[in-house]
Every structure is written in C-alpha cells, then in structure tokens.
C-alpha cells in the first residue's frame, strides 16, 4: 500500500454483513486510517449487543447508512447481506457516492429480498453455522477468530432478512463499483450471475463495474485484513 495524499484520501463508510457490528472492521479500519482516510464503521440498528431485533426493518438499516453518507462524497463499502440496505442508500444518494465497494457480495436489483419467506423475529448465527462451515465460507479463519465470531454475533433482525428492496434511480448503475471476490472468484461471480442466481443479478446491471479477486473465505476483514484494506484503498483512490 502507498500512503495517499490529501487529495486522494477519502471518506470511507464500512458496513458489516449479518450478525456483525462496527467491531468486525477494527483491523481494516485502522489500516485505512493509517493511510490517511477518514473511516466510519457502522453498527446497524438492532445489531448492538443485547438489543431487541423485533421491529427493525430493512428501511431502518438503509436510513442508518444514509445518515452516515450525509452530504458525501463517500466510498461506501458493504459486506455480505449489507448489500441490501447499501443498494437502497446508493439509489437515494447517487450524488453522494464516489464509489461503492462490495466485499464478497454485489449490489442487488429492485424487488430483491434475502429471504422473503423468513419467519420469526431474528436469524441467529447458529442457524447458519454448520452450513457456512461446510461451504468453506470460514476458510482461513483461526480458532480464536471463530470463537470471537460466535461470542460477539448478534441475531440478525428478521425485517432485514425478509423485506424487499425498492429502487427508483437508475443513475445508481453508473456509480463506479468494485466487487472484491473472496469466497468465489470474479469469473465465478460473472458465471453465476449469467446463470440466473438471484442474489447476483445486480452484477449484470452495473455499467461501471470492476471485479477483483482476493481468494479466502467470506470474512476477509479477519482472514486477510491487510490485503482487503489495500484493495479498498486502491478502489477509494481509483
């Protein structure tokens, strides 16, 4: 990594995926700050330790991201399931987004929902733990990192799993976007999108998209923080 000048340092907002708070970005955020960037990591509503997830909606998450964007311009970084509220926030704040960065995820399309049929008040990490392990999503994580993940994970509010995205401004498709492909390669992302995988249909819509590979698991902020920070830094200065 090279140290940016004042002119190319950026305001960067880091949004964690399901079950996580701002703490998940601690290592990456520190590295980006050391490079001169102004960094804000978010804990979205209902994901504070001990919080009540009932009644927390996808709209509440989108609004929290919008509040962080303010007047912009910002580089908005979204991990995993944060793609849903992040896409909404970009759609509503096109002029405030200098670039979007998607960490093992992608912008979503109008009407998309993570799981529209999900029932209950919250989705706990434990409900997905074995599936994630078997899929290799936790590749390169140490036993200590896995233990901390389980200990600090907060149940994901059901509304953010179930609610559908509503989009209105097609200018969002021209916002420069970078997908950092970790659990799957860039070639895989493109192939799966072309095969019709619902979660990746936004890949095909983007008109200013760069895709880069960072081979590891689904949580590169822990498995490869230095490499991830370098790629975010490069995108921010792009």
Image (cartoon, helix red, strand yellow):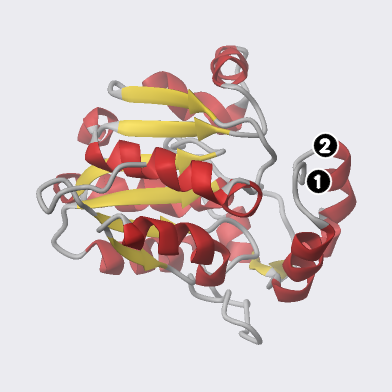
In percent of width and height, residue 94 lies at 20, 44
Is residue 166 visible in the rendered image? The answer is no
Q: Nearer the viewer, residue 75 or 235?
A: 235
In the image, residue 199 sits, relative to residue 85, either above or below, namely: above
Q: For the residue labelled by badge 2, is the local secondary structure a helix, a strand or a loop?
A: helix
Callout 2 touching callout 1 (CB < 8 Å):
yes
Quarter of the picture containing the N terminus is top left
**Residue 172, how many percent across, how many down?**
26, 36
Q: Residues within 10 Å of mark 2 (few under 14, many from 20)?
A: few
Q: Quadrant of the C terminus?
A: top left
Q: Check the image and name the residue furthest to the left.
A: 7
Residue most extreme to the front: 2
Q: Is residue 185 above or below residue 123?
A: above
Q: Quadrant of residue 61?
A: bottom left
Q: Is residue 66 left or right of residue 45?
A: left
Q: Residue furthest bottom?
A: 50
Q: Quadrant of residue 123?
A: bottom right
Q: Is residue 112 left or right of residue 133?
A: left
Q: CA distance from mark 2 to mark 1?
A: 5 Å
The circle on residue 135 is: 2
Q: Is residue 178 above or below residue 52?
A: above
Label at residue 132: 1
What SS does tag 1 mark? helix
Residue 231 seen in the current view: yes
* Towards the viewer: 40 or 91: 40
Q: How many marks?
A: 2
Question: Residue shown at 57%/47% (left/top)?
Answer: 80
Label disc, if present, on residue 177 of the rendered structure: none
Residue at image location 62% in from the left, 18% down from the top = 188
């Amino acid at each position: 990594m090279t140290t940016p000048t004042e002119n190319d340092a950026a305001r960067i907002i880091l949004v964690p995926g399901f079950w996580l708070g701002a703490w998940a970005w601690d290592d990456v955020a520190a590295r980006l700050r050391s490079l001169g960037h102004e960094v804000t990591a978010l804990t979205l509503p209902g994901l504070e330790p001990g919080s009540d997830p009932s009644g927390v909606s996808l709209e509440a998450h989108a609004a929290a991201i919008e509040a962080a964007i303010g007047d912009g311009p910002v580089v908005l970084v979204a991990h995993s399931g944060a793609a849903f509220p992040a896409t909404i926030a970009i759609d509503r704040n096109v002029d405030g987004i200098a670039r979007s960065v998607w960490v093992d995820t992608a912008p979503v399309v109008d009407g998309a929902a993570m799981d529209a049929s999900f029932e209950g008040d919250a989705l706990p990490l434990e409900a997905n733990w074995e599936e994630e392990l078997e899929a290799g999503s936790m590749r390169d994580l140490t036993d200590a990192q896995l233990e901390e993940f389980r200990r600090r994970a907060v149940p994901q509010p059901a509304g953010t799993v179930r609610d559908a995205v509503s989009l209105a401004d097609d200018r969002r498709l021209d916002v420069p976007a970078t997908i950092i492909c970790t659990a799957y390669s860039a070639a895989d992302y493109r192939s799966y999108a072309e095969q019709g995988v619902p979660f990746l249909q936004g890949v095909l819509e983007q008109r200013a998209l760069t895709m880069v590979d960072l081979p590891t698991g689904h949580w590169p902020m822990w498995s490869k923080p230095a490499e991830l920070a370098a790629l975010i830094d490069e995108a921010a200065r792009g």
